[in-house]
Amino acid sequence: MKWSLKAPRVSWDTIRNWFFAGVAFFLLGSFAIFTRNVFGDDADEWSVIDREIMLQVAELRRPWLNGAITDITALASIAVLSM
């Protein structure tokens, strides 16, 4: 029996499939970590941060600014985006 020291040939399709599988698992793991941080044990910390940001923005509120922000928000409407 003769032993061969040559490595087996791997096709590019196999390499590409393993690459995409690795990317998919990485993205899935990143999503799992993100959702655990948002909704996990420290969700109360996130709600405190969210509340503080909301209160800071509410202090900046002015009557003349309401119209401008409403116009900016309207730019994301279905009518504008469909054009």
Image (cartoon, helix red, strand yellow):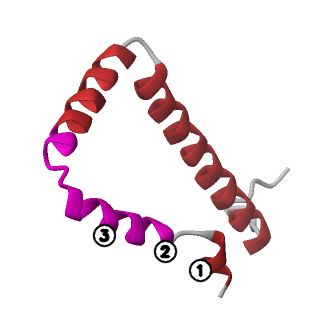
First reached walking from the N terminus: tag 1 or tag 2: 2
The reply, left or right, for residue 65 in relation to residue 11 is left
Q: Residues within 10 Å of mark 1 (few under 14, many from 20)?
A: few
On the image, which quarter does residue 7 sit in? bottom right
Q: Are marks 2 and 3 in contact (CB under 8 Å)?
A: no
Which of the labelled discs sits on residue 75, or is there none?
2
Magenta residues, as a range?
56-75
Spot occupied by residue 69 in the image (x, y as percentages of width and height)? 33, 64
* Position above or below: 42 against 57: above
Q: Are marks 1 and 2 in contact (CB under 8 Å)?
A: yes
Kindly identify which residue carries mark 3: 68
The dominant secondary structure in magenta is helix
Q: Closest to the observer: 13 or 35?
A: 35
* Position above or below: 80 against 6: below
* Position above or below: 55 against 47: below
Q: CA distance from mark 1 to mark 3?
A: 16 Å
First reached walking from the N terminus: tag 1 or tag 3: 3
The reply, left or right, for residue 69 in relation to residue 10 is left
Q: Does the magenta portion include 23?
A: no
Amino acid type assigned to the residue bearing label 1 in the image: Val
Amino acid type assigned to the residue bearing label 2 in the image: Leu
SS class, disc 3: helix
The reply, left or right, for residue 55 in relation to residue 72 is left
Q: Residues within 10 Å of mark 3 (few under 14, many from 20)?
A: few
Kindly identify which residue carries mark 1: 80
